[in-house]
Image: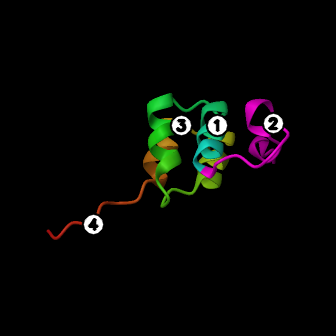
Amino acid sequence: MTIKHLEPCGPCSADGPPVDVIDWRLCRLLESGFARELAQRLASARAVDIHALLQLVDHECPPELAARILSPIANSDA
Protein backbone atom coordinates (compact mmCIF):
# COMPACT_ATOMS: atom_id res chain seq x y z
CA MET A 1 0.00 0.00 0.00
CA THR A 2 1.31 3.43 -0.91
CA ILE A 3 0.28 6.48 1.02
CA LYS A 4 1.68 9.39 -0.94
CA HIS A 5 0.33 12.05 1.39
CA LEU A 6 2.56 10.96 4.28
CA GLU A 7 5.64 12.28 2.49
CA PRO A 8 4.91 15.90 1.64
CA CYS A 9 6.73 17.53 -1.22
CA GLY A 10 6.52 20.89 -2.89
CA PRO A 11 5.06 23.94 -1.14
CA CYS A 12 3.60 21.94 1.75
CA SER A 13 7.01 20.82 2.97
CA ALA A 14 8.68 24.22 3.12
CA ASP A 15 11.39 24.61 5.74
CA GLY A 16 10.87 27.14 8.48
CA PRO A 17 8.22 27.81 11.07
CA PRO A 18 5.00 25.77 11.02
CA VAL A 19 2.33 26.97 8.64
CA ASP A 20 -1.28 27.66 9.50
CA VAL A 21 -3.29 24.42 9.75
CA ILE A 22 -5.91 25.52 7.23
CA ASP A 23 -3.18 26.58 4.78
CA TRP A 24 -1.49 23.19 5.23
CA ARG A 25 -4.78 21.34 4.66
CA LEU A 26 -5.49 23.43 1.56
CA CYS A 27 -2.00 22.79 0.20
CA ARG A 28 -2.26 19.02 0.71
CA LEU A 29 -5.69 18.87 -0.96
CA LEU A 30 -4.52 20.91 -3.95
CA GLU A 31 -1.44 18.69 -4.33
CA SER A 32 -3.75 15.66 -4.32
CA GLY A 33 -5.84 16.95 -7.23
CA PHE A 34 -8.79 18.67 -5.55
CA ALA A 35 -10.25 21.66 -7.36
CA ARG A 36 -9.39 24.93 -5.58
CA GLU A 37 -12.98 25.81 -4.56
CA LEU A 38 -13.65 22.32 -3.14
CA ALA A 39 -10.24 22.24 -1.44
CA GLN A 40 -10.88 25.60 0.22
CA ARG A 41 -14.24 24.44 1.58
CA LEU A 42 -12.81 21.16 2.87
CA ALA A 43 -9.67 22.73 4.34
CA SER A 44 -11.71 25.07 6.51
CA ALA A 45 -14.24 22.41 7.63
CA ARG A 46 -13.00 21.03 10.95
CA ALA A 47 -15.39 18.05 10.76
CA VAL A 48 -13.70 16.74 7.58
CA ASP A 49 -10.87 14.24 8.08
CA ILE A 50 -8.21 15.38 5.60
CA HIS A 51 -6.09 12.26 6.11
CA ALA A 52 -9.06 10.03 5.22
CA LEU A 53 -9.73 12.15 2.11
CA LEU A 54 -6.12 11.80 1.02
CA GLN A 55 -6.19 8.03 1.59
CA LEU A 56 -9.29 7.67 -0.60
CA VAL A 57 -7.68 9.72 -3.38
CA ASP A 58 -4.47 7.71 -2.98
CA HIS A 59 -6.57 4.61 -3.66
CA GLU A 60 -7.85 6.09 -6.95
CA CYS A 61 -11.10 7.59 -5.63
CA PRO A 62 -11.90 10.82 -7.51
CA PRO A 63 -11.56 13.89 -5.24
CA GLU A 64 -15.20 14.93 -5.66
CA LEU A 65 -16.43 11.48 -4.65
CA ALA A 66 -14.04 11.30 -1.70
CA ALA A 67 -15.41 14.64 -0.48
CA ARG A 68 -18.97 13.37 -0.79
CA ILE A 69 -18.18 10.16 1.06
CA LEU A 70 -16.55 11.95 4.00
CA SER A 71 -18.63 15.13 4.21
CA PRO A 72 -20.65 15.37 7.39
CA ILE A 73 -24.39 15.03 6.95
CA ALA A 74 -26.26 18.21 7.79
CA ASN A 75 -28.46 17.84 10.86
CA SER A 76 -32.12 18.21 9.89
CA ASP A 77 -35.25 18.21 12.00
CA ALA A 78 -37.31 16.32 9.42
* Quadrant of the image occupied by residue 75: bottom left
Residue 60 shows in the view: no
Amino acid type at circle 4 is Asn
Residue position for label 4:
75
Residue position for label 2:
14
Above or below, comparing residue 35 to residue 26 in the picture: above
Numbered circle sitting on residue 63: 3
Amino acid type at circle 1 is Cys
From which residue to which does the magenta span run?
1-21
Residue position for label 1:
27
Residue 17, x across and y down, in percent: 79, 47
Most common SS among magenta residues: loop
- 3D distance between C-alphas at marks 3 and 4: 24 Å
- 3D distance between C-alphas at marks 1 and 2: 11 Å
Check whether the beta carbons of the residues at disc 1 and disc 3 lie within 8 A of each other: no
Amino acid type at circle 3 is Pro
Residue drawn at x 81%, y 48% is 1
* Quadrant of the image occupied by residue 34: top right
Number of residues whose C-alpha sits closer than 10 Å to that of mark 2, classed few (under 14), some (14–19) or many (20 or more): few
SS at mark 2 in the image: loop
